[in-house]
Image: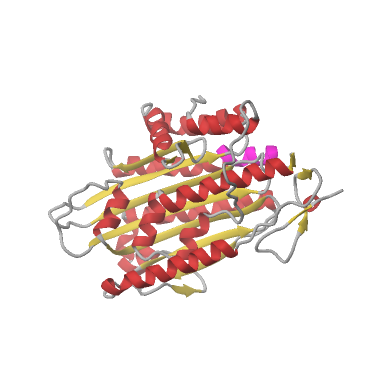
Amino acid sequence: MAMKLARVGTLGPTSAAARPGRLVGLGPTPRHSSRLLASTAKASAKTSDKKKTDTSKRPELEGHVAIDAPPASFVTEREGDEAKDSIRHKFEKLIRESQDSICAAITEVDGMEFREDAYTRPSGGGGITRVLQGGNVWEKAGVNVSVVYGLMPPEAYRAATGNDDAELNGEGFVPFFAAGISSVMHPHNPHAPTMHFNYRYFETEQWGGIPSQWWFGGGTDITPSYLYKDDMEHFHGTLKNVCDEHDEAYFPKFKQWADDYFMIKHRGERRGCGGIFFDDLNDKPKEELFEFSKQCQQSVVPAYVPLVEKHMNDEFTEDQKRWQQARRGRYVEFNLVYDRGTTFGLKTGGRIESILMSMPLTSRWEYDYVPEKGTPEWDLLDACQTPRDWV
């Protein structure tokens, strides 16, 4: 008998047989509601409103303006055509091309188009958010692009640089420019992994005795619910090939950085099985680091999509779905408590719907849910607690 899974955010339940992957077992699958996440987001927004009182003169906190279509370039719209040869404009062009190609690849597999929302910021710049929700293969997939001019408080500067102990002696706010692309993709099938990537270029103006700075950052990482060795070898191997083309020291360094960064400290485990992560990268010429970021972005589809295609039709049980939801809970914990991008977005008046796009539609917290040793679930947890070398 085909079981029914509740699809949050769609027009009612959809049978498991109606999409790739078949749920095996008896009894109803627990229904999950988006109301909790929605109410949490509203509460966060209210808290944010209270905090705006002391910073009301900051134009970037005055809200975002929805537009029917994004301009050809947020950078040249603000800076003029003379900015066309700047690294700011080149990086915006790159991330928008990446957004187009990656969304096209996901739509080709899923069969559903992305919804697009474009907006501008009063202080300059704007963004393009694309979300596929309640799809045939992906429960939720989003690819965001943002180009931001603004002023950030010192605590946001610390979040951007990852240096919580930095001594900042300046007064007021730090002028900055940031452009980036970020994405999270959560498939329906527990055997198909979640994937995240983020690539950005950042500039700050001289402030508080600190000279103007620029750097690249980013990374791509994987979060499976079930561990398949050949999948991990393919994913990490694809990233290693890109790194090795630029610097053979990159992959081991950035792989370790990912293992350290995605640590859920209060759990003593990582969010997933890593990948690469880097930040504050400015030790080589801009054009050289630009090309590295470009190739990283171009590697997302070949590294990830074949794994989803491989597993999207796998049969799964109710218990396996429960485990996936528990791991999604860990994903939420990391993003809301530790993720640098989320923290920076919230502290600089970012668009809430875009910032929280990374949240899965459904997740689960069961009291003292510990898998039995020797099971596939235990194997995944062990890999999250003690990172493995896959290539």
Residue 123 visible to an observer of this rendering: no
Residue 349 at x, y percent in the picture: 37, 66
Residue 175 at x, y percent in the picture: 24, 62
Residue span colored magenta: 302-311
Q: Does residue 92 lie above or below 192 as drawn?
A: below
- Give the main secondary structure of the magenta stretch: helix
Near-viewer residue (166 or 379) = 379
Residue 75 at x, y percent in the picture: 36, 63
Q: Does residue 129 lie above or below 158 as drawn?
A: below
Residue 184 at x, y percent in the picture: 53, 50
Corner quadrant of residue 178:
bottom left
Near-viewer residue (70 or 374) = 374
Horizontal relation, residue 148 to residue 28: left or right? left
Asked if the stretch drawn in magenta spans residue 84, the answer is no
Residue 106 visible to an observer of this rendering: yes
Q: Residue at x 59, y 45 (%)?
A: 326
Q: Residue at x 75, y 60 (%)?
A: 13
For this orientation, the residue located farthest to the front is 367
For this orientation, the residue located farthest to the right is 1
Q: Residue at x 79, y 53 (%)?
A: 18
